[in-house]
Image: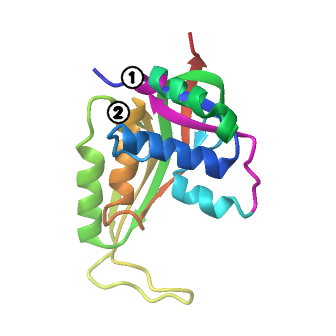
Amino acid sequence: MPKEYVEVFLSGDFDVVKGFVNGYLVGRGVTRRPFFHVKRGIIRHDTLIGNLRAFLEIRDHVPFCLDRDLLDDFREAVTVVRKRLGLEVVELKRVISAHMQIEHEIVNRDVATACKDLLSNLPDEIEVLEYEPAEEQHGEYPDLTMTSLAHSYTYRGSGVVRGDFEAVTDLFFAIKQSRCSDHIKISHLELNLLDYE
């Protein structure tokens, strides 16, 4: 059975929130890196946030996703440091599912094979919608045009990956850590949220 996740909306300075959350998770033995959000329901991995912070001042409220099993203990930990660090849990949302748009245009057969393997061996908790990849063979030798060299082989496709939060984020990491990372464009991860009860 898939794990349940909660989007936690924590008030406080971004750097303090990020340090506290990472420290809490490491202390609990969780090796999975958290996703911090640009805004509610839209996630970018925390390494991208560092680049965005130069342009966006994220200071007051920081949303991120947390395993539901850790929530009660996490809230207690926030209560302990509230006065010292100025942190407070403002709001909670249940994460029902996640989705992301993918797109690729690959001209290297070996990379295309690796990407096919990655996108075809998906767990049951994920479905790929509107995805009809196509391979094109353009002849033994590429044609030289006025603007560029036309490749002899192309593997194109686009679609939406949707499903369980953890399964979708695992695929996100698998793509980013594979040799396909430079060839598969991924949109923001978007969440389907409900009020937390």
Q: Nearer the viewer, residue 156 or 31?
A: 31
The residue drawn where x is 55% and y is 90% is 146
Q: Nearer the viewer, residue 161 or 21?
A: 21
**Residues marked 1 and 2 touching at CB (< 8 Å):** no
Q: Position of residue 114 (x, y in %)?
A: 24, 61
The residue drawn where x is 40% and y is 85% is 143
- Secondary-structure class at tag 2: strand
Say above or below: 43 vs 57.
Answer: above
Is tag 1's residue or tag 2's residue first in the polypeptide sequence? 1
- Secondary-structure class at tag 1: helix
> Residue 69, which numbered label?
1
Q: Position of residue 68 (x, y in %)?
A: 43, 23
- Residue 64 painted magenta: yes
Q: Nearer the viewer, residue 145 or 191?
A: 191
The residue drawn where x is 65% and y is 23% is 91
> Residue 186, which numbered label?
none
- Residue 83 painted magenta: no
* Mark 2 residue type: Ile
Instruction: State the scheme by which the image is colored.
Output: rainbow
Query: In this rendering, would 88 be left or right of 47?
Result: right
Instruction: Give the magenta part as a residue range.
Output: 55-71
Location of mark 2 (residue):
126
Using the rendered image of the protein, determine whether residue 185 is visible from the camera's viewpoint: yes
Q: How many marks?
A: 2
* Mark 1 residue type: Asp
Q: Position of residue 14 (x, y in %)?
A: 66, 48
Q: Looking at the rendering, which quadrant does residue 155 occupy?
A: bottom left
